[in-house]
Image (spheres, rainbow, N blue to C red):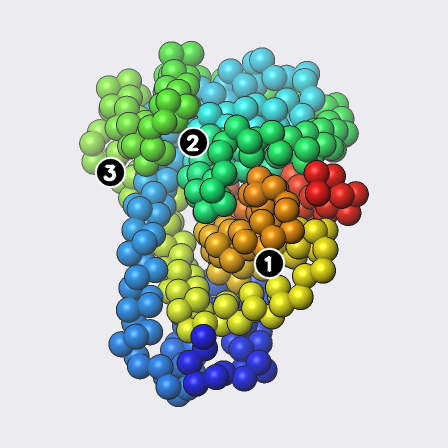
Amino acid sequence: MIKNSLRPFEIYGVIIFFVLSIIFCISVDISMAYGFIVSLVAYTLFFIKKGFKWKDLFFMMLKGLRECKILYVLILLIGATVSIWLSSGIVPSMIYYGFKYMAGTNFLFAAFLLISFSAVFMGTAVGTVSTIGVAVLGIGLGFGIPSNVLIGMIVSGAFIADKISPISGLLNLTLSTTNTRYKNVLKSMSVTLIPTFIITSVIYYLLGTRFAGNIDLSSINSLQTSIANSFYVSSYLLSVPVIMVLMSAFGVKIIYSILVSLFVGILISSLVQGFSIVQIIDFIIFGFKINTGSSLDRILISGGVISMIEVLIIVIGAISLSSIIEGTGVIDFFIDKFFKRIESKRELVLKTGLVSSILTTITCDQTMGIVLPSRILFHEYEKLKIKKEILARTISDTGTIIAPLMPWNVNALLIAIVTGSSKGYIPFAVLCYIAPLVTILVSYLDFEL
């Protein structure tokens, strides 16, 4: 219940104020941290005025921040790992051999399949983007493909992980909150996943044909020469990403597999590439860049841990804000209003997808878009005799998959920092649009309902 009976127009005002704050930051091209900070201060003052104690609001924020403590470490580790994978020659070697073996192929299509396959074994979308995705981005740029198209493709393939990977934290959260088993949910997901994957693949294949003839072989040879002159390049270095994928496939948590790859990368940077410990520490903190005088310089660059500080501030602000929104009952108000009258199975599924998407949008993370619909709607699905696997599938196809389309979402922020693209990739993240549309179509046709 909402304390002191906040009136509906006040509750709508709370959400509108936040959305307008973020839109303003994006439109004037300033950090979204300002939008979150202003919203957080405004919300705190507003709810204190409405009768909440500041201590209660503080503990709401603290509880949410504590629950996400691993995320802060992961963010900083990603910043360090991208730099070390560059300095160690791991990413340069992946790019070097990628130029060699992927020239002449439909790169967008082939890379989408590669990223999708890797993501399933890695179990994390952001982890896939920040490791294998960085190398694929470098290869694609060398082939003359626009960065936004490449990043959109990488995001599409990477988010297969959050949707179907058996070791994905988000999928396992979905399974536990909907009380379903992986085998049964995967079977149900195939109804929407197969057409989604086929449509997405066809789109990237057609897009890829536009760039297949743009490859300048002399430019590629020049880039390969620059890489070979700047790094020790070896196929043995490719074993590091392979080991990382295998560790994830065998159930090792992503934070540990990233730590291992970071440590191995530091050793290679020092012992193989010849960088000093002081230089390596500098790479970790301030990022890596190289000066070859070629276009390689704009490909092999990263911001290090320092570049993640802004993301960390935004994430902390987003979690604090969503904790207050949940703790004060604002979200419960929307849920109650939204599901007051449900007259058909189709309507329930459609509203499930919509509310999951809205929660992911306003709370800046997928967790709320998974937990609340699962918890609140579980009995509604039982009442209307709809399989609970469809509840899990609908949440996965909507609230989980649309996250990178929101520039203020935690996932989108990390993607932007790792790839250097703020929001230009969003129109090209095809799978993130197709999945919800296919879910709506399947629901409209009453498949399995």
The residues tagged by marks 2 and 1 sit, at their Cα atoms, a distance apart of 25 Å
Task: Give the alpha-carbon distance from disc 3 to disc 2, as whole Å.
Answer: 32 Å
Sequence-wise, the earlier of marks 3 and 1 is 3
Q: Which residue is drawn at the image coordinates 72% and 60% (left, top)?
A: 343
Q: Which residue is disc 1 drawn over?
A: 355
Answer few, some or many: residues within 10 Å of disc 2's Cα (few below 14, many 20 plus, some between 14 and 19): many
| Residue corresponding to mark 3 | 281
Spot occupied by residue 80 in the image (x, y as percentages of width and height): 33, 39
Q: State the residue position of label 2.
A: 167
As drawn, is 260 to the left or to the right of 116? left
Query: Would you place residue 169 above or below residue 15 in this image?
Result: above
Which one is in front in this view, the residue at disc 3 or the one at disc 2? 2
* 142 on left or right of 48: right
State the residue in front, 368 or 417.
368
Q: Are marks 3 and 1 in contact (CB under 8 Å)?
A: no
Secondary element at tag 1 = helix
For the C terminus, which image quadrant?
Answer: top right
